Image (cartoon, rainbow, N blue to C red):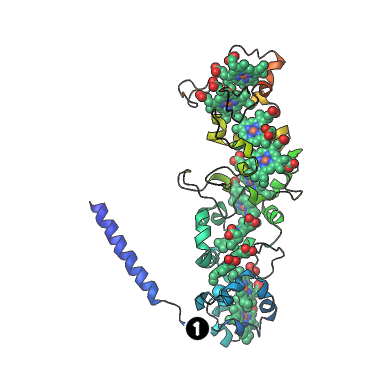
Amino acid sequence: MRFGVCWVVLYLLSLASAGAADNRAPNKELYAGSLACRTCHPDIYSTFYRNPHQKTLVDASVPFEQQGCEGCHGPGKAHVEAKGDKSKIFAFSQKEPRQILDRCLTCHSNTLNRANIRRSDHTRADVVCSTCHSIHKSPTPKALLAKNQVELCYTCHSNVRAQFSMPFKHRVNEGFMQCSDCHNPHGTNTPTWRGGGRPRMVDQALANEEPCLKCHVDKRGPFAFEHLATRVDGCESCHIPHGSANARLLKRPTAFPLCLECHNGAPGFGANPALGVPRQSASHNMADPRYQNCTSCHVRIHGSNTDSRFLR
Ligand code: HEC
Ligand code: HEC
Ligand code: HEC
Ligand code: HEC
Ligand code: HEC
Ligand code: HEC
Ligand code: HEC
Ligand code: HEC
Ligand code: HEC
Ligand code: HEC
């Protein structure tokens, strides 16, 4: 009961602070308009027409405080009158990562909050918008990136470059794929993963699936007989997604040690947790090399519509 009262009080407090925000509504007197910036920042002004943010100037429905230069840099009249005093404008070079994030999210929160951006590994490590995006000097045609995407990611994740140079790999270094085919650098949200971010910022495709299935559609199913390993643990339980010394990007050089890591009868997992994941039956003679190549018989290892043991 007392708990309920607490919530009511909190609710009233939140109403009060919302009211306070209204009192601080932007004052048009403090704004100079983007044209005023041209005199002293001609280089930036003259290339701005190519910037997607130009839209805020030409669309009449955008409120004045969100238009053009001042949409990001805040009211500029005082800065103009002081002949360019940096402390009188929102100068990104002087701001904390959090302040930059909040500033960009005043307009971009709709889409990016869906990606759980405030809880992403990047935000927590103070890697924010202006680390990856360059508003005024972007060399890329898309998304105002500070560098071509893969090079951008490698500036901090240099160990990943080597993974994409392994003998078997996705061809990212060759330019056929990008990191964002599998990751969302803004974070990932998934309703089923404890309401939080999916580990490693691995993006979800379509509804709530692994991004792998966008391209490897034949693995998507649903199958009459699913291999639980794929559905529960995902593709990473058997494959190394970036690159591997093993064919088919497998985690182990051959199939059988991979299979036996799970098919060892240890309890706690599988359709009957007390019995665990079944071992191969007695018909399998493990001393016979023929039997060691599990997938020569269990050919539908990702799931089958005709056989519960994935034999066809
Ligand atoms: C979408 C937000 C945004 C808009 C709109 C914007 N800026 Fe910027 N501006 C930034 C960011 C972020 C920086 C920090 C440097 C960077 O990351 O590119 C910056 C840096 C600057 C700088 C510092 C010099 C530099 O190159 O670092 C000046 C001056 C500037 N902006 C002026 C302007 C003017 C003039 C306009 C309008 C024509 C404008 N800005 C529009 C976000 C914006
Ligand atoms: C009278 C000339 C003048 C006008 C007009 C002017 N600025 Fe500036 N601005 C300057 C000067 C000079 C600096 C450099 C100040 C310094 O480095 O201490 C500056 C710095 C800035 C910075 C800070 C860059 C940083 O270091 O991060 C921003 C942002 C900026 N101006 C945006 C604007 C915007 C937006 C407008 C239009 C509303 C504008 N300026 C109009 C002269 C001007
Ligand atoms: C770790 C690097 C990184 C950070 C941090 C980052 N972005 Fe991005 N952003 C990217 C990349 C890479 C793309 C291009 C994705 C693609 O091509 O599919 C992108 C795309 C975008 C797009 C266009 C496509 C879309 O998803 O809507 C917007 C808008 C955007 N970012 C805004 C932001 C804002 C605002 C912030 C901060 C709140 C931010 N980004 C932080 C890397 C980053
Ligand atoms: C005043 C509102 C506003 C603010 C603040 C703002 N943006 Fe934007 N942003 C927009 C609009 C509007 C577009 C154009 C969307 C479209 O094309 O439909 C856009 C587009 C973008 C794009 C997409 C470019 C592309 O090629 O698709 C990126 C990236 C981006 N913004 C990054 C940022 C970053 C980083 C910041 C903070 C420095 C920021 N924005 C602050 C309104 C804003
Ligand atoms: C400015 C440096 C920087 C840039 C640029 C950057 N990252 Fe990161 N990234 C980090 C840091 C710091 C972390 C958090 C610490 C960690 O786990 O490594 C992180 C975490 C990650 C993680 C989660 C790692 C884990 O172990 O859970 C992924 C995935 C990731 N980044 C992908 C990307 C991609 C894709 C890009 C390019 C769009 C990118 N990063 C660009 C610095 C960066
Ligand atoms: C084919 C899909 C795919 C592509 C392309 C991809 N990743 Fe990953 N990445 C993954 C998956 C899946 C994981 C999680 C692996 C796991 O949890 O075992 C991961 C994990 C990571 C991690 C955390 C683990 C580690 O190895 O440090 C980082 C950092 C990372 N990726 C960065 C990148 C960068 C940078 C790029 C682009 C150069 C990239 N990834 C491209 C699928 C991909
Ligand atoms: C953007 C499309 C795309 C995505 C997303 C993608 N892949 Fe791939 N994958 C490919 C292509 C194309 C190849 C063929 C290898 C090549 O030449 O690049 C491949 C090859 C493979 C191979 C090796 C096949 C062989 O015959 O050797 C495996 C295993 C694999 N991918 C698993 C995955 C996993 C696991 C994921 C998710 C983490 C994933 N893929 C995400 C496009 C994709
Ligand atoms: C239980 C372990 C396991 C899981 C989980 C798994 N795979 Fe595989 N996958 C294998 C094995 C073993 C092979 C090699 C088959 C062979 O050599 O005949 C393979 C081969 C592949 C190949 C290349 C040959 C082909 O059939 O196209 C692709 C692509 C692939 N897997 C993608 C995926 C994707 C995408 C997922 C997640 C949806 C996934 N795998 C999950 C074990 C697994
Ligand atoms: C990540 C763990 C894991 C890996 C690796 C794995 N499996 Fe499985 N497998 C399972 C689980 C869990 C089941 C479902 C067991 C149950 O129903 O109790 C299963 C079921 C099976 C079945 C059907 C068993 C039955 O009685 O219906 C076969 C056959 C099978 N796996 C073969 C393989 C082969 C061959 C490999 C190696 C390529 C492999 N598995 C790798 C976890 C795994
Ligand atoms: C020569 C073909 C062949 C090879 C190679 C093979 N299997 Fe089988 N496996 C079968 C057949 C046929 C069945 C179903 C009849 C049976 O249980 O003997 C089966 C059944 C299974 C089952 C289900 C057992 C149960 O009790 O329901 C598992 C688990 C399994 N195999 C795992 C493996 C693993 C792991 C490997 C590799 C070490 C492997 N198999 C190699 C043919 C093969």
* Occupied quadrant, residue 133: bottom right
What residue lies at 70% left-to-right and 26% top-to-bottom?
Answer: 254
Above or below residue 2? Residue 260 is above
Quarter-of-image position of residue 168: top right
Residue 172, x across and y down, in percent: 72, 47
Q: Image quadrant of residue 42?
A: bottom right
- Element on which disc 1 rests: helix
Instruction: Point out the image quarter for the C terminus.
Output: top right
Q: Nearer the viewer, residue 229 or 16?
A: 229
Foreground residue among 286 and 89: 286
Residue 271 in the image, given as x and y percentages of width and height: 48, 25
Residue 279 seen in the figure: no
Q: Nearer the viewer, residue 203 or 8?
A: 203
Question: What amino acid is labelled 1 in the image?
Answer: Leu
Residue at the spot 36% in from the left edge and 73% down from the top edge? 20
Q: Is residue 151 above or below residue 104?
A: above
**Can you see residue 64?**
yes
Q: What is the number of callouts on the image?
A: 1
For this orientation, the residue located farthest to the front is 306
| x and y percentages locating residue 48 in the rendered image | 66, 75
Picture coordinates of residue 29, whole percent (x, y):
48, 85
Disc 1 residue crowd, few under 14, some 14–19, many 20+, Cα 10 Å = some
Is label 1 within 8 A of ligand 2 (CB to nearest ligand atom)?
A: no
| Residue at the outermost left position | 1
The residue drawn where x is 75% and y is 48% is 173
| Residue carrying label 1 | 30
